[in-house]
């Protein structure tokens, strides 16, 4: 059984809802998950888990939100080699850079050596009813994939 951290930044509750659904999927798959806001944890907390998922909403024209910046900068101090990670978030398709913060977070994790899932979950605003299962499945697949990594 994998023990995972799902850390997120959310202003309006959209990314928090996605994170909660992902945790539901992880636990439905028989794994453990801790759900934390990035304002309530440190980036180094990811080292205490078998894998981790980062959720971030996109601010403005593709930027990281202010409350995510400390966590993001703390990642520069970590060696994430061998750590499994995935990234998800919410955004607005009316902007040229849809969910740009998700892409920035994934790039930072790769730069720090994490094994980042090529699958990223991007949701416009909050998940529609049919997208809720997509969120749960994202968590289930990530947790299950950890059992196959040697």
Image: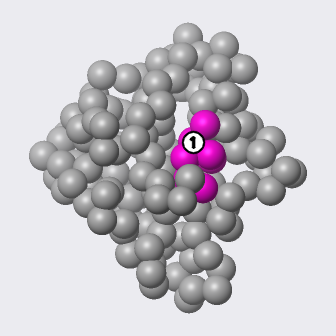
Element at label 1: helix
**Residue in view at x 58 percent, y 62 percent:** 90
Colour scheme of the picture: one colour
Label 1 sits on residue: 19
**Residue in view at x 44 percent, y 73 percent:** 59
Asked if one can make out residue 120 in the rendered structure from this viewpoint, the answer is no
**Residue in view at x 21 percent, y 54 percent:** 70
Asked if one can make out residue 34 in the rendered structure from this viewpoint, the answer is yes
Q: Is residue 134 left or right of residue 81?
A: right
Residue 89 in picture, x, y percent from top left: 55, 57
Q: Nearer the viewer, residue 7 or 29?
A: 7
Report the magenta residues as a range: 14-20
Residue 57 in picture, x, y percent from top left: 49, 62
Q: Is residue 77 left or right of residue 50?
A: left
- Tell me the chief SS of the magenta region: helix
Q: Is residue 44 left or right of residue 17?
A: left
Q: To which quarter of the image does residue 1 belong?
A: top right
Residue 56 in picture, x, y percent from top left: 46, 57
- Residue most extreme to the front: 12
> Does 64 sit above or below residue 131?
below
Q: Nearer the viewer, residue 126 or 53?
A: 126
Residue 5 in picture, x, y percent from top left: 43, 30
- Residue most extreme to the left: 77
């Amino acid at each position: 059984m994998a023990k995972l951290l799902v850390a997120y930044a959310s202003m309006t509750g959209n990314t928090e809802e996605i994170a909660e659904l992902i945790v539901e999927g992880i636990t439905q798959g028989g794994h453990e998950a801790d759900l934390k806001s990035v304002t309530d944890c440190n980036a180094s907390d990811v080292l205490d888990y078998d894998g981790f998922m980062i959720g971030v909403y996109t601010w403005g024209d593709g930027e990281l939100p202010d409350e995510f910046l400390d966590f993001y900068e703390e990642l520069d101090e970590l060696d994430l080699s061998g750590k499994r990670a995935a990234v998800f978030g919410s955004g607005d398709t009316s902007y040229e850079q849809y969910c740009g913060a998700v892409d920035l977070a994934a790039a930072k994790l790769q730069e720090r050596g994490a094994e980042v899932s090529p699958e990223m979950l991007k949701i416009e605003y909050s998940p529609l009813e049919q997208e809720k299962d997509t969120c749960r499945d994202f968590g289930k697949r990530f947790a299950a994939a950890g059992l196959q990594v040697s």
